[in-house]
Image (cartoon, rainbow, N blue to C red):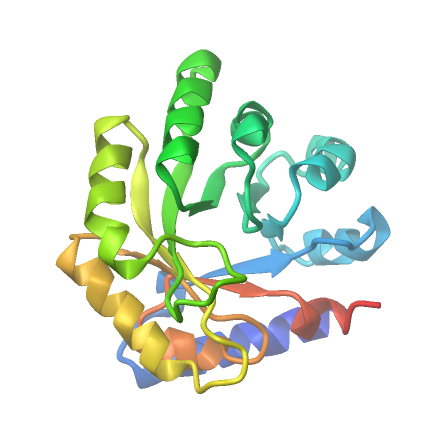
Amino acid sequence: MTASTLSAIDSSITRAARLAGRQRGDVTLIAVSKTQPPEAIEPLLAAGQRDFGENRVQEAAAKWPALREAYPDVTLHLIGQLQSNKADEAVALFDVIHVVDRPSLVTALARAMEKAGRRPDCFVQINIGDEEQKGGCAIAELPALLAAARDAGLPVVGLMCLPPADLAPAPYFALLAKLAREQGLAGLSMGMSADYETAVTIGATHVRVGSALFGPRA
């Protein structure tokens, strides 16, 4: 993983955005640093990358406070499923939470935000392919969950999805974009290493790229 890898991905995002009549600045690249040690993250920080994604509260808490001392302008995104009992830690540590997917988590996050006096932006995660093993709320439950989140004072900025791994992602990205439009939400957290360019052409505002930046995980 080098600065040149980051530059190449940046160029790919720019090209995909241009194809869709969008600007590079419309898209936030989240470097997915889960399982990566600080020494693998530091070259990206040195190259100017400032948005990073982590799956687990505990892992992020172990490595990011020290990194943030050197780079206080980092934005940390939680992109892995969140247990309600970890809401306090998540609110203290993360700037954006992409995985709001059920009423009990809305309640826990609202309470944690009130206590901490800190309000990270939130994305509601949709189970876009209706897959049993994945987190995310059912499409039919989205309006009710969004209403609950807004009533609780969560700053909901968009929707997030993980399309089925073995199918073409474009129809799922298009569906997420349609759902967001219907709900008056501008943010679309979609697209990973294999399909982020497709996601950008369909309107992604946040792409979550791990292996294309860091190499395959062990």
* Count of numbered circles on the image: 0
Q: Is residue 106 above or below residue 102?
A: above
Q: Is 75 in front, or is 199?
A: 199
Residue 57: x, y in percent? 65, 37
Look at 77% across and 73% down and name the residue there.
Answer: 216
Residue 50 in view in this figure:
no
Residue 100 placement, left or right of 74: left
Considering the image in quadrants, where does the C terminus appear?
bottom right
Residue 119: x, y in percent? 40, 27
Q: Is 25 in front, or is 94?
A: 94
Q: Is 141 in front, or is 196?
A: 141
Residue 51: x, y in percent? 56, 51
Q: Give the quarter of the image for residue 175.
A: bottom left
Q: Is residue 212 above or below residue 205?
A: below
Look at 48% across and 63% down and name the residue there.
Answer: 132
Residue 96 placement, left or right of 124: right
Q: Is residue 184 above or below residue 169?
A: above
Q: Residue furthest top?
A: 115
